[in-house]
Image (spheres, coloured by chain):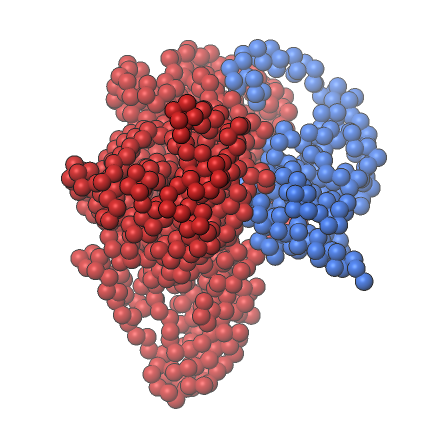
Chain colours: A red, B blue
């Protein structure tokens, strides 16, 4: 990375020292004054009317201060404004096993737990709906009668572009398949926790393990019917999210309510079993897909029909429904494209967003089908993918702008480094029986262009809502404090933001301090989900830093006796797809999507040097210390600056056009090598070569970490993970029974970051947190096919399924 | 909540009432046991109930919150501490069992303000993401390198596999342990 001081240098994440010494305080570690311990009584029924609920005995139990039920909450909530269907505590009906039905606050955990057993609940069972097919059948008693439907359909999303029959007619190979995916849990190590501090005037500070402090802030206010300004939400250190902490949760409302009722601080940490009840993990999914391929033109048509099982409540489900379709619009050209995705309610814990949200399962289906089509057409699956990739500065059928794509170089490098040509050769099965190599590609959003919560605020155009605001203040010693609402959930977002500010101001990273994810101190940011932080909060931080730099440059000019710098309007981007759309905001040179800050000065090593001040060569060569400029700038009082990020206007005019719309997309290719034991069905992934185009890697150490983590999670889905339900009761709610990959499963990993400069990303960066998960899963499936000639369409690909498929192939003759 | 109950067993209601009768406050005091322990080099006497786990004692009473509670069932390993130098799962170990023994938590690993080589290399290798498993990972590695100056990759994997990490895919943690081993060998040899 030419000329950067901080950007592009592997940097251990801020907070590492606290984490490695045990000082880091996660939510459950915070010691509040004498908190009441909260425990939640949960439903033992998948579907029932609460005929009677009585907490009198519990309330009289020694040490108990309060007990609440669903009647104590009027409003429901939900992360999407269009499906606020979730109560903090079930009222009148329970919809899944594990749903809160009452809660108790007591002086200690033992009293709370014992009092919970004294709560009398009488249920009248209602026939549960546990299966997604059954959910589509007509019924007299739906899970959400308020929708006034005769089935348990929650959302049906569909879109079509181009001419499907024409597309399939032009294909030389048409393949189709039915795929099945199990429900998954995020399995972060830190169970959800919440602590609420109440002050003398009755105002609340809610410490919670959340990815979305500002969403939680608003949800708390609505559910508690308590003013926003009297609630402060703080996210302490957080032990992993992966989407599983990106909804507001009932337990957060419960703790806050109990604090309000008792006037005491409250504390709750969920058990691991409760984490599985709370779920919000990956939707169990059935997909029927049909793909037409022409060896020269690429994918001529892609038709998808998906059925996703959302569990009892909405969560992110409407978005997930669209993502199951629209995230198939890359990384290849797909001119003729249709999808329909039904999300249904069932009597199970709800599903929501999980790393790779909505895009992982359809990606598996499409990449396996593409592999089948390539075999059928007799073409090399890597060469074919190279040929069909989306190109820079193009637009997809559903009007996604592709501003940068480095996958061509990435896949080529992956082919070389993995020895693809030697191992795959002309057709599959070149390696010895039991050894295989497979490829798959994918893409992912760098943040959703449409903010989900503020999207109709004040009747403003949806896309004009500010995605992120970052504020900076500067200290007398030149140190900078960054206030950002972005949540560092372990991915290192604080570090990335600090690095960007340090780069613009030319000061060491150690002089940047971050205050993040605190709704009272930090400007609004939507939080950490949809891989938006580096791109959106990063752009806002960079813009704020450039404004700070401007003030310092002006001060420096005064001290050096130079005229104040004059800023040129940057040249407007000329990409064709911006024509007709709103032009990026250049009203201030500092607010363009990725403004050039070449102001004729160099900020480096605590010095401000003039290269060519304001076009006059007079000041060239002069320099001044950063500290002198800071002192001068502070003469006028405290110095602060803020920067914002607003997505450029984009997208089509059709229904659902905003789904999957992002200012920029990352691209990924995996070449995966496996060993399959034909006697046991056991699959070992030996090596993966991953090319991930994340634009400019801001912190290469964190980029590698994100990719390695995505591989771990993808492997879990590919080979072992599944939440198993019997009659609506989860059978494996523990790390003992819900197996995730161990170090022994982690393969050798070779990571490639192809060169690609994203013109709108901060310093050219794009997302890295999620995109590298989805294509790993089908790359394993395609490698298994290469190894033993079986096509698995049910995920996870466990030994029993592998064995069964192998024996079928043997019976049928290979 | 009782797991059987969550899965639809109603008989636990009866168990609940019974246990309340058994555990009233006065009997709690008579059930206290006195233990002498050394925690991070500090000798102390504590009175604990038989059902109090070492995790509860360390976190709730001694406020050593570097010991993490990830599952309470001995599955995730995040609660690991060293007992006389050997890793144990503090969430399933009754505190009264550690009478007369030495406990080291993550808070006791850095000596005189300087980090242990394992801690240094965990930071430098980027082995820390969310950090929730980090204390346990460090303690397990400290024990490994105490017993085995030159562990093989398999031995490192074995050591790391005792703790669940969902962020890193373990790769960088393994690298960190290998790096720390190298550094410690280098500083040992004259």
Q: Position of residue A236 (x, y in %)?
A: 54, 46
**Image quarter in which the C terminus of chain A is found:** top left
Q: Residue sitting at 36 percent across and 18 percent down?
A: A129
Q: From the image, which quarter does the N terminus of chain A lie in?
A: bottom left
Decide if residue A728 is in sight here. yes
Q: Is residue A36 visible in the rendered structure shown here?
A: no
Task: Tell me if residue B164 comes above or below residue A733 in the rendering.
Answer: below
- Tell which of A458 and B83 is nearer to you: B83
| Image point (65%, 31%), residue name | B74
Q: Is residue A403 above or below residue A669?
A: below
Provide residue A790's location: percent of width, then percent of height: 41, 32
Residue B10 falls in image quadrant: top right
Q: Residue at x 38, y 74 (%)?
A: A598
Q: Nearer the viewer, residue A679 or A138?
A: A679
Q: Is residue B36 left or right of residue A421?
A: right
Q: Nearer the viewer, residue A266 or A779?
A: A779
Disc tally is 0
Q: Quadrant of residue A65?
A: top right
Give the camera-side residue of B43 and A654.
A654
On screen, residue A669 versus residue A335, left or right, reads: right
Q: Which residue appears at 32% of the width and 26% of the height? A: A344
Instruction: Residue A802 in the image: state x and y as whole percent.
Output: 46, 29
The x, y position of residue A375, in whole percent, is: 33, 40
* Residue farthest bottom in this picture: A618
């Amino acid at each position: 990375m030419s000329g950067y001081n901080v950007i592009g240098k592997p940097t251990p994440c801020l907070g590492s020292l606290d984490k490695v010494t045990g000082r880091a305080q996660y939510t459950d570690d915070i010691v509040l004054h004498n908190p009441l311990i909260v425990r939640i009584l949960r439903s033992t029924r998948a579907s029932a009317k609460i005929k009677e609920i009585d907490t009198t005995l519990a309330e009289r139990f020694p040490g108990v201060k309060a007990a609440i039920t669903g009647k104590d909450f009027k409003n429901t909530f939900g992360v999407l404004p269009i499906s606020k269907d979730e109560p903090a505590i079930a009222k009148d009906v329970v919809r899944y096993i594990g749903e809160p039905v009452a809660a108790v606050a007591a002086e200690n955990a033992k009293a709370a737990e014992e009092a919970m057993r004294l709560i009398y609940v009488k249920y009248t069972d209602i026939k549960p709906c546990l299966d997604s097919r059954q959910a589509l059948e007509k019924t007299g008693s739906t899970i959400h009668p308020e929708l006034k439907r005769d089935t348990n359909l929650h959302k049906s999303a569909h879109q079509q572009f181009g001419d499907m029959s024409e597309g399939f007619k032009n294909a030389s190979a048409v393949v189709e398949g039915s795929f099945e995916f199990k429900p998954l849990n995020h399995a972060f190590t830190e169970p959800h926790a919440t602590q609420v501090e109440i002050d003398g005037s009755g105002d609340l500070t809610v410490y919670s393990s959340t990815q979305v402090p500002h969403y939680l802030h608003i949800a708390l206010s609505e559910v508690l019917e308590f003013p926003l300004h009297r609630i402060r939400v703080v996210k302490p250190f957080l032990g992993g999210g992966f989407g599983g902490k990106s909804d507001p949760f009932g337990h957060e409302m419960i703790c806050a309510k109990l604090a309000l009722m008792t006037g005491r601080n409250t504390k709750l940490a969920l058990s691991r079993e409760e984490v599985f009840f709370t779920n919000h993990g990956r939707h169990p999914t059935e997909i029927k897909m049909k793909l037409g391929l022409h060896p020269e033109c690429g994918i001529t048509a892609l038709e998808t029909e998906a059925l996703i099982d959302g569990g009892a409540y909405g969560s992110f489900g409407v978005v997930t429904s669209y993502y199951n379709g629209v995230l198939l619009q890359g990384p290849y050209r797909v001119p003729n494209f249709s999808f329909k995705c039904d999300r249904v309610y069932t009597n199970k814990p709800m599903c929501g967003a999980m790393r790779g949200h909505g895009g992982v399962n359809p990606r598996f289906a499409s990449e396996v089908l593409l592999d089948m089509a390539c075999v059928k057409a007799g073409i090399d699956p890597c060469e074919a993918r190279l040929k069909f990739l989306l190109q820079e500065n193009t637009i997809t059928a559903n009007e996604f702008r592709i501003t940068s794509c480095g996958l061509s170089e990435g896949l080529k490098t992956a082919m070389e480094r993995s020895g693809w040509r030697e191992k795959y050769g002309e057709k599959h099965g070149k390696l010895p029986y039991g050894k295989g190599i497979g490829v798959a590609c994918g893409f992912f959003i760098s943040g959703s262009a449409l903010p989900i919560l503020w999207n109709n605020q004040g009747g403003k155009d949806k896309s004009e809502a500010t995605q992120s605001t970052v504020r900076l203040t500067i200290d007398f010693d030149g140190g900078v404090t960054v206030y950002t609402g972005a949540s560092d959930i372990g991915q290192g977002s604080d570090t990335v933001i600090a690095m960007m500010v340090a780069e613009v101001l030319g000061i060491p990273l150690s002089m940047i301090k971050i205050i993040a994810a605190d709704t009272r101190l930090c400007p609004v940011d939507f939080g950490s989900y949809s891989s938006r932080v580096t791109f959106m909060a990063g752009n806002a931080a960079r813009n704020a830093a450039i404004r700070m730099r401007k003030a310092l440059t002006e001060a420096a000019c005064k001290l050096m006796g130079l005229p104040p710098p004059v800023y040129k309007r940057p040249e407007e981007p000329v990409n064709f797809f911006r024509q007709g759309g709103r032009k990026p905001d250049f009203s201030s040179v500092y607010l363009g999507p990725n403004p050039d800050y070449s102001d004729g000065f160099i900020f480096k090593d605590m010095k401000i040097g003039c290269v060519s001040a304001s076009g006059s060569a007079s000041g060239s060569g002069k320099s001044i210390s950063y500290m002198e400029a800071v002192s001068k700038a502070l003469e006028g009082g405290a110095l602060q600056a803020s920067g914002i990020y607003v997505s450029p206007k984009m997208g089509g005019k059709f229904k659902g056009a905003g789904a999957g719309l992002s200012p920029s997309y990352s691209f990924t290719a995996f070449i995966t090598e496996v060993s399959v034991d034909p006697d046991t069905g056991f699959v070992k992934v030996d090596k993966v070569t991953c090319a991930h185009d994340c634009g400019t890697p801001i912190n290469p150490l964190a980029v590698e970490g994100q990719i390695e983590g995505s591989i771990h999670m993808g492997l879990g889905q590919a080979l072992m993970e599944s939440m198993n339900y019997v009659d609506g009761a989860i059978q494996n709610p523990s790390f003992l029974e819900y197996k995730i990959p161990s170090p022994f499963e982690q393969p050798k990993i070779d990571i490639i970051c192809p060169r690609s400069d994203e013109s709108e990303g901060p310093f050219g960066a794009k997302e890295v947190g999620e995109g590298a998960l989805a294509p790993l899963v089908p790359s394993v499936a395609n490698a298994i096919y290469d190894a033993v000639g079986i096509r698995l369409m049910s995920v996870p690909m466990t030994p029993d399924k592998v064995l069964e498929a192998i024996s079928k192939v043997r019976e049928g003759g290979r | 909540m009782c797991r059987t109950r969550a899965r639809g067993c109603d008989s636990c209601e009866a168990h609940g009432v019974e246990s309340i009768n058994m555990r009233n406050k006065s009997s709690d005091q008579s059930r206290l046991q006195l233990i002498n322990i050394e925690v991070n080099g500090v000798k102390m006497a504590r009175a604990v109930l038989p059902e109090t786990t070492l995790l509860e004692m360390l976190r709730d009473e001694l406020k050593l919150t570097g010991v993490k509670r990830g599952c309470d069932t001995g599955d995730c390993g995040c609660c690991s501490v060293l007992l006389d130098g050997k890793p144990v799962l503090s969430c399933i170990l009754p505190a009264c069992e550690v009478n007369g023994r030495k406990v080291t938590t993550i808070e006791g690993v850095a000596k005189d303000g300087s980090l242990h080589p394992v801690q240094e290399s965990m930071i430098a290798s980027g082995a820390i993401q969310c950090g929730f498993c980090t204390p346990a990972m460090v303690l397990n590695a400290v024990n490994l390198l105490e017993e085995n100056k030159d562990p093989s990759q398999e031995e490192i994997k074995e050591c790391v596999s005792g703790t669940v990490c969902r962020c890193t895919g373990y790769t960088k943690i393994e690298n960190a342990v290998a790096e720390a081993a190298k550094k410690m060998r280098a500083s040992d040899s004259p």
